[in-house]
Amino acid sequence: MKRIALGVQYDGAAWGGYQTQPSGNTVQDQLEAALARFATVPIATTCAGRTDAGVHAIEQVVHFDTDIEREMHAWVRAANSFLPPSISVRWAHTLPSLAGEEFHARFSARSRTYHYVLHRHPHRSALLAGRAGWTFRPLDVAAMRAAAAHLIGEHDFSAFRSSQCQAKSPVKQMYTIELAEHGELLVFTLRASAFLHHMVRNIVGSLLEVGVGKRAPEWMASLLAGRNRSDAAPTFMPDGLYLARIEYEAKWGLPQEDFACIVPGLKSAV
C-alpha cells in the first residue's frame, strides 16, 4: 500500500464546496468518482482544507492510499479525462515513509495561504461574476492595512469564526496579511497556520468596514479581544476566495507549482 498526493485546481462556482455530500455535487465527489473509474475500485481522498460552496482552489492538496501500480502521469491524465472542465488534477506524487512518519494532506501542512480577490468599481463586472468579490464603494486601503496589522501573531480568532466551525481551538497563528492593488482589483493575501470556518471571508468583511470609514483600524484589535462573532462584520461573499497554497516540509518532495500570477486569468478579465 502506498500513499499518493495530488495537486488539484478548481473553479468552485458550480460546486457545493469540497467535502462530499449526498447530492454528489462537490469537488470531492467528482474527484473520487474520476479516480475510481480509472482504478476500477473506490478511492477515498483526504484534503488539506475543506472549501465552501463557491470557493476556488489554485492548488488544493489531497492524498489517498492504494496498492494499484500506475505511473504518476497516468493518474493525472486519467483523472482529468473523467473530470469536468472546472476541476483539474495538476500533479501526482508518491510519498515516502520517513522513519515511520506518514504524510497527511491536512496534518502535515505547515501553513495555508488564501487569496481574496475584490473588484472595486461603481458597476459589477459580468466577466468577474463568480470569480471575484465586488464593492462599489471607494476604499481607504491604507486604513485597511493598518487594521490588518492588528491580526498578525497568535490570537483567538473567535470573532471571525462561523458558528458551524468544528475546529478544536480558535487560536491560530496569522503570519502575514497583505493587500495588493492591481488596477480595479484589490487582492488580500492571508497566510496562517490554519484557518477557521469562514475566517477569511469574515476578516475581509470587517476590513471593508474599515475601508469605507465605518470603523477605525483599532476596531480590529477590539474584535480580537471581545471574541464575539456578532460584533464583527457579516460574512463576505465567497466568489473571490481562493485556496492558494498549502505549505509542507521539503522532505516530502511535493512538485507544487509556483504561480506567478495572483490568480490565473483574472488580470486579463478586468
Image (cartoon, rainbow, N blue to C red):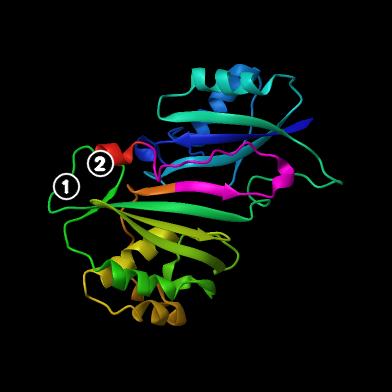
In the current view of this chain or complex, which residue is farthest to the left?
122
Q: Position of residue 180 (x, y in %)?
A: 35, 57
Which residue is under mark 1? 124
Q: Identify whether 167 is placed above or below 262.
A: below
For the residues labelled 1 and 2, say whether their Cβ atoms are less than 8 Å apart. Answer: yes
The quadrant in which the N terminus is found is: top right
- Is residue 247 part of the magenta span, yes or no? yes
* The image quarter in which residue 209 lies: bottom left
| Main secondary structure found in the magenta portion | loop
Q: Which mark is residue 128?
A: 2
Task: Please indicate, yes or no, whether residue 231 appears anywhere in the rendered image.
Answer: yes
Name the amino acid, label 1. Arg
Q: Identify whether 199 is placed above or below 90.
A: below
Depth check: give the residue in front, 178 or 46: 178
First to last magenta residue range:
243-264
Which element is circle 1 on? loop
> Tag count in the figure?
2
